[in-house]
Image (cartoon, rainbow, N blue to C red):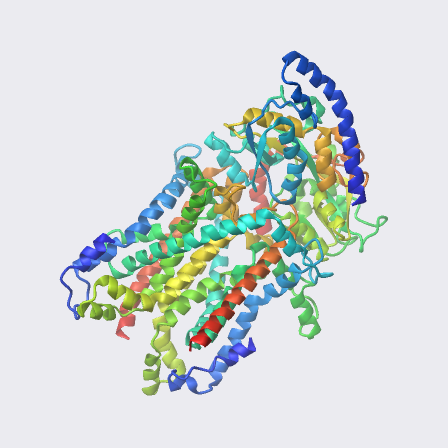
Amino acid sequence: MNRAVGAAVPAPERPPLARKIDPGRALLTLFCVGVGIFLILPIFIVIPISFSSAQFLQFPPPGWSLQWYQSFFSNHAWINALKTSALVAVPTTILATALGTAAALALIRSTFPGSGLINAVLMAPLIVPVIIAACGIFAVFRFWGLIGTYSGLILAHTALAIPFVVVTVSASLRTVDRRLEQAARGLGASSLVAFRRITLPLILPGVLSGALFALVTSLDEVIVSLFISTAQVRPLAVQMWSDVRGAIDPTIAAISTMLFGFSLVLLLLVSLLRRSSR
Amino acid sequence: MAIVRHIAKRPEVGVFRPASSDGVRFGSAALVAPAALFLLITFVYPVGLLLLRSLSFPVWGIQNYAAIVHESLYLRVLANTVVISGVVTLLTLALGYPYAYLMATGSPSVQRLMAFVVLVPFWTSILVRTYAWLVLLQRRGLVNRALEWSGLIAEPLDLVHNRIGVYIGMTQILLPFMVFPLFAVMSRIDRGYLQAAANLGAPPARAFIRVFLPLSLPGVIAGVLLVFILALGYYITPALLGGPGDIMIAQLIQQQIGEFGEWGIGAALAAILLVGTVLLSAVLNRFLKLDRIWGGQA
Amino acid sequence: MNDAYQFRRFVEQVRSRRRVVQGVGALAGLALAGSSPRLSVAQSTPAATGAFKGRQMTFASWGGAYQDVQKKAFCDPFAAADGVNVLQDGPVDDAKTRAMGESGHSTWDVVDVTDSFLYNASQDGIFEPIDYKVVDRSALIPDYTHDYGVGTIVWSNNIGYNTEVYSPENHPTNWADVFDVKKFPGKRTFPGGSPDVNMEVALMADGVPTDKLYPLDIDRAFAKFDTIKNDVIWWDTNSQSQQLFIDGEVNLGLILNGRAYDAAKKGAPIAVEWNGNIQSVDYFVVPKGAANADVAMAFIQFAGQPAQQAIMANEIAYAPTNPAAIKLVDPKVAPWLSTTPGNREKGILINVAYWRDNLKTVSDRWNQWLMS
């Protein structure tokens, strides 16, 4: 953490305002270190538990063992669930990001009759309690033969993820000066080119945030997935939720640790790539 | 898409025309169609059928809504849910705004690290995460032991199995939904404005409040909306980390439908939640549009 | 390990004895039907008929270790015996089970449900009536059978206590002790999600004899809970109830026998008192319109056999509903089971019909009370 804070010293292209070491910024940095610790505190409990020799979640672990990693990799139900999650989350992310970004463009860039109603439609999946969504989707998807299929899961997850994209992209779009795009079009660019070359780069942080939320929605969602999955097609979140009746064993801690490790490796890779490309 | 391309070929609008032409308006409005149609088929239709049960189950009428109004429990749980969600939203804003600010104004490597940290809560399954909080917060937990060891407290604090536990657990998991919209907006704010304000002699705090804060409002509103709405639907975290009084509406709906088969009451509660939230977001939207004009003048 | 091995041998022996007896019956049937002599080879498990060869059936339960053992105890042997392909599904969810039954075209054929759900939902016509021409009702304890469901396991709500804090001689022995914060100071735990069981134990603690419990004096039960309200940590999931004991957050309280057994087996210092235990039953039901209802009935009959139920008890400490199964249970597990003679008499079976009619009202009041 501390090293990271050191890196907060601004890059050369920053305006001189930020270059001065000012006490306000030091205080802010300290505050953010606190927030960071708050965010990652639980994982410091989870990682040791995943290497525990105890049969139940116990902290501190009485001894060490790799049994929970073995139990993950030796159980094909877990591996299948991981595969299902990947096969569902990736198309969901792409579909939701495309649909949501387009919708946000329309909502922010134009006024049209019924936009309030359409806004409500776009936000509904976020608001309707999941149990209601699950029961409704289950009844209709059964009729359409989508229960226990990848397409069923992708469609449902995309529906749940669209509002996240709409909200984040809308927020970004509100900050974009439209005159830039209009200028580009005035210079002869088609609206598609103007969007791709001017607007998209400007709203990219919002689009990426939305895509991230879509991905996480698909990976984390339990209740709707529980209704539309079967034993054969069952995502990771449902598999983790599966032992509702019994004791939870540290296998789920092992999965959390692996996901954490995976994202850490990703971070390091991106950093290395950036460094070497400079 | 075909429509878009067709519109795009139309004679161009002048650079200095402030508002969009009819063509552009129509073209970009059509972009909402795919998402809206998709949701109408996969979500609104199935869920609408279910919500209709609030009026049709067990017989047609408004008896379910009447029952909710007359039963003080439902109203109390609704009020409870709104209070918890509101406090969690404020907490995430208080923690998330400075965090996003530092992230947006930091170097790329700082940004990556801070984004990584804020995403950590997503990688832990809800069951493990809750357990980890219990280990940290319970009376003989790590936090209490650390505080006692440091001599700050003599008696362990009750940090979990009560409202405090709910706030801590929910704030941690919902913080990313505040930070990312804020970051997305803040990273687009031209620091030149702040520079200009400073050059005009405004103290940094004043420049921040008068310039940066208004420009970041779209991000604030997006974050507040996301966190508040998501919090309304929470139920596992409050059930496990909270005390007996921390019942939230989603738990009640689950109970009404699963345990009692009261589709009508469950659907009516959901409908009330839906309408209330849509109204709220409409109000926020209106506020935002007004603000955009105001912000444009700044 | 050794115990388990010995038990398995024991079961094998019992099974092979049964096979001889059943083999005679099967031979008689064979002679009558005049079918292929190869059928006798398939007689590796009791009650094998092969009548459903090539058929398929979906079994839905709660997932995790529980369903793994069910698969081993019921599904796999049934599949081997009758030539049925048994598909596993789950975890079940009450709302999903309802939606299945209401649709009238259930893809689940057999579902594991709790007693309260059975009593509530059977009124709404979402289950097929049990075909007691196929299922042998007389083999099971009558309390554990229902027009729409057949009991498969019994579990109970017990007084649990930390064995490092209390000894076998000095521990809470009745519910009055659990409600006595002077005699047994410190936090105690109860399930917070629902008033059933909590009401009963409060009344027992207040001196109501078990045969006079129902109809419950709700006011009196709430008054009793008022006396300890600030000394309770409520649990919401079974694993949480275990965790509270393991972490030492509580030293006594209400815990399910199976959860206490599981924690004790894994080394936690926990024991249960059987005095005043309240028993509940899990039922197998067939949702309305199940495609393979006939196979489902045969499965339910199969799963009620002593050898099958004994596997369940030995592996995961859920008690059998068939009294003949008790004899096949490992003597180390038997003391933990709700239907072991001695334990069963010390407690009562929860009055599910009472709760069916009163749960909603009392539940609302319970939630109000918790929030006040």
Task: Indicate the position of residue B6 as horizontal and vertical percent values.
Answer: 18, 55
Q: Of all residues shown, which one is farthest toward the top?
A: C32
Q: Quadrant of residue C346?
A: top right
Q: Of all residues shown, which one is farthest toward the right?
A: C169
The quarter of the picture where the C terminus of chain A appears is bottom left
**Left/right of residue B264 with respect to residue B192 in the rendered view:** right
Residue A245 vs B222, above or below: the answer is above
Task: Indicate the position of residue B88 as horizontal and vertical percent values.
Answer: 49, 62
Task: Indicate the position of residue C204 as horizontal and vertical percent values.
Answer: 73, 40
Can residue B160 be seen here? The reply is no
Residue B222 vs B2, above or below: the answer is below
B262, B219: nearer the viewer: B219
**Left/right of residue B163 with respect to residue C48 in the rendered view:** left
Q: How many marks?
A: 0
Q: Quadrant of residue C320?
A: top right
Task: Indicate the position of residue B141 as horizontal and vertical percent values.
Answer: 67, 64
C242, B244: nearer the viewer: C242
**Residue at x 32%, y 53% (from the top left corner):** A119
**Residue at x 70%, y 32% (from the top left corner):** C308
Residue A9 vs B273, above or below: the answer is below
B244, B134: nearer the viewer: B134
The quarter of the picture where the N terminus of chain A appears is bottom right
A143, C145: nearer the viewer: A143
**Left/right of residue C190 with respect to residue A169 in the rendered view:** right
Can residue C274 be seen here? The reply is yes
**Residue at x 68%, y 66% (from the top left corner):** B156
